[in-house]
């Protein structure tokens, strides 16, 4: 039984897949397994994944029969996971070498059933172009995360013996399904303990950083109304708050002299 199960969905990810997996190979913490699940890619991602699987027995490659989106793809990985902890690394993101060691130590120190960390934001070439997204070394409850989602998927980790296996909601069509999952966990576990260390790099296209905000905000509102059962005014107000802070998240990084 590995200490940590890492869930990685893959869809047309050939450009960055090896970089993401090699950031896992480079971890100082070595007691992990990788569930690399391909969602019927049209490029050579499956061939790359199979080659990586041959390099390390800790990797399990799973080829899906039908394309069904990132939520269901991650759920396939979770169902096959054996670890005490479950973490998420997308095929275009990167972990620092001390990510797993820092997160496991942090969660054990604070007896935290769920945790997440700070991260930097990079472009396609790996250049940091925004200020890093920072969280505090403190407890966060359901209401804190409902007010503003501070949980970055690439830094999230939960403890299976405490909260059980928790799954993404495919009905959300891979929009705000991660946010819904964090709220589900916090309803039961009562708190998460943030890790202020910057431990990962989230990759986005510069032009796409804010371009889909209208679509995301609509999905956000619907999720709060239909899934969290909030009133119209509460859901609308919280959606505006998320939209505002979401724009601030991608503010240009200050140039250092």
Image: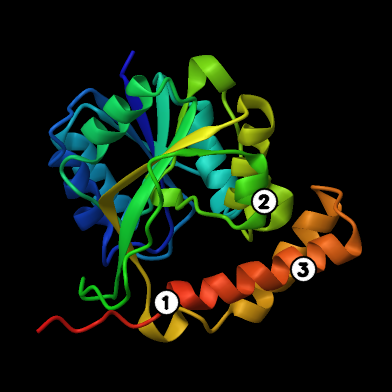
Residue 35, x across and y down, in percent: 38, 35
Disc 3 element: helix
| Pointer 2 or 1: first along the chain | 2
Q: Is residue 155 left or right of residue 175?
A: left
Label 3 and label 1: CA atoms lie apart by 21 Å
Give the position of the N terminus as an image quadrant. Answer: top left
Q: Which residue is mark 2?
A: 146
Q: Are marks 3 and 1 in contact (CB under 8 Å)?
A: no
Q: Which residue is mark 1?
A: 250
Residue 247 appears in the rendering: yes
Q: Is residue 185 above or below residue 39?
A: above
Give the residue drawn at x 17%, y 32%.
56
Disc 2 element: helix
Give the residue drawn at x 26%, y 67%.
15
| Pointer 2 or 3: first along the chain | 2
Of badges 3 and 1, the one in the foreground is 3
Q: Which residue is mark 3?
A: 237
Q: Is residue 192 above or below residue 117?
A: above
Residue 180 appears in the rendering: no
- Of 85 and 22, which appears nearest the observer? 85
Residue 230, x across and y down, in percent: 85, 53
Q: Is residue 84 left or right of residue 212?
A: left
Give the position of the C terminus as an image quadrant. Answer: bottom left
Q: Is residue 141 left or right of residue 13?
A: right
């Amino acid at each position: 039984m590995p200490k940590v199960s890492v869930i990685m969905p893959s869809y047309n990810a050939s450009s960055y897949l090896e970089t993401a997996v090699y950031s896992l190979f480079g971890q100082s913490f070595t007691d992990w397994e990788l569930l690399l699940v391909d969602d019927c890619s049209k490029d050579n991602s499956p061939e790359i994944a199979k080659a990586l699987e041959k390099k390390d027995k800790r990797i399990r490659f799973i080829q899906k029969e039908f394309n069904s989106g990132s939520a269901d793809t991650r759920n396939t990985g979770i169902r096959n996971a054996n670890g005490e902890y479950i973490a998420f690394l997308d095929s275009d993101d990167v972990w620092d070498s001390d990510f797993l060691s820092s997160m496991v130590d942090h969660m054990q120190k604070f007896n935290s059933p769920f945790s997440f960390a700070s991260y930097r934001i990079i472009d396609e070439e790996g250049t940091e172009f925004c200020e890093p997204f920072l969280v505090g070394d403190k407890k966060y409850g359901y209401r804190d995360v409902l007010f503003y989602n501070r949980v970055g998927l690439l830094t999230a980790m939960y403890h299976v013996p405490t909260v059980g296996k928790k799954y993404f909601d495919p009905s959300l069509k891979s929009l705000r399904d991660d946010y819904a999952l964090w709220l589900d966990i916090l309803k039961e576990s009562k708190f998460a303990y943030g890790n202020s260390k910057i431990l990962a790099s989230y990759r986005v296209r510069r032009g796409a950083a804010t371009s889909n905000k209208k679509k995301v905000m609509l999905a956000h509102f619907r999720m709060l109304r239909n899934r969290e059962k909030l009133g119209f005014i509460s859901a609308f107000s919280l959606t505006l708050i998320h939209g505002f802070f979401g724009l601030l998240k991608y503010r240009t990084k200050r140039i250092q002299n």
